[in-house]
Amino acid sequence: AQSVAQPEDQVNVAEGNPLTVKCTYSVSGNPYLFWYVQYPNRGLQFLLKYITGDNLVKGSYGFEAEFNKSQTSFHLKKPSALVSDSALYFCAVRDDTGRRALTFGSGTRLQVQP
Amino acid sequence: AAGVIQSPRHLIKEKRETATLKCYPIPRHDTVYWYQQGPGQDPQFLISFYEKMQSDKGSIPDRFSAQQFSDYHSELNMSSLELGDSALYFCASSSGPGRISYEQYFGPGTRLTVT
């Protein structure tokens, strides 16, 4: 069974400051990891993924994430937060076997204050 | 760029009624997934199809069924609706094993309210 933990229900950060949204995972086999963002009453928008290769992956809107195999983590980061980044962020995982359904974390609400 | 289309966007039904949700994947995507997101919850995988065949099954109730048609669109049929079925239902699509695409692209969702 695979699982994702997002330990923070909410993260507050001031505009212009760096942000980190935490994610740890558990999966048998090699992990495929994803971050999605959800704005109110909207669908999930794909931000970035880690499949293999460099541990630091870059995605949309200036976001990046660092894969750490030993800590089974995939934290989302951005050097300088914008008020418009305020949204709900989901980390998701699947393994490298045939099953391709995503398992999501519980989500972290990011609030960027002006 | 074309995105995943879901219809209807909003649906209100009474208990014990039936509902049909439709999903049109991104062109040339041959895999469709259905997820259910309850209020304040994370999305939960229901079922997926690849090349019109069911490829995986998650926590889909027996009252629900789904299929993928020859044009790759998919329908989720929900019968004997219960109050607890009120949720946001997402469809996502991706390209299949023949074309490597790991991420899933989500539609805007159908908000189902059961009264």
Image: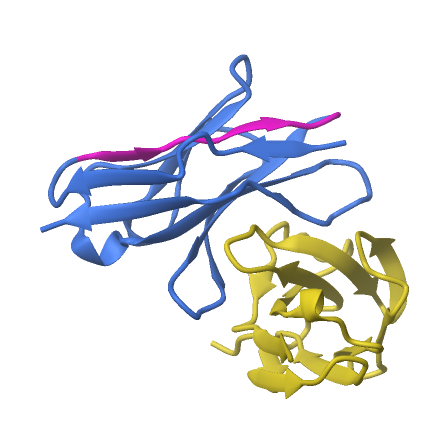
Q: Quadrant of residue A30?
A: top right
Please indicate whether residue A4 sits to the left or right of residue B48 in the image: left
- The residue located at (75%, 68%) in the rendering is B30
- The residue located at (60%, 60%) in the rendering is B37
Q: Quadrant of residue A105?
A: top right
A58 relative to B85, above or below: above
Quadrant showing the N terminus of chain A: top right
**Chain (yellow):** B
- The residue located at (32%, 44%) in the rendering is A63
Residue B14: image x %, image y %? 71, 84
- Residue B27 versus residue A42: which sits nearer the camera? A42
Residue A21 highlighted magenta (yes or no): yes
The number of discs equals 0
Q: How is the image coloured?
A: by chain
- Residue B114 versus residue B60: which sits nearer the camera? B114
- The residue located at (73%, 36%) in the rendering is A96
- Residue A12 versus residue B66: which sits nearer the camera? A12
- Residue A47 versus residue A114: which sits nearer the camera? A114
A39 relative to A81, above or below: below
Residue A3 highlighted magenta (yes or no): no
Please indicate whether residue A64 sits to the left or right of residue B95 in the image: left
Please indicate whether residue A108 sits to the left or right of residue A5 in the image: left
Q: Chain A: what color?
A: blue
Residue A34: image x %, image y %? 53, 43
Residue B32: image x %, image y %? 73, 66
What range is drawn magenta here? A18-28
Residue B112: image x %, image y %? 62, 77
Direction top: furthest residue: A70
A78 relative to B39, above or below: above
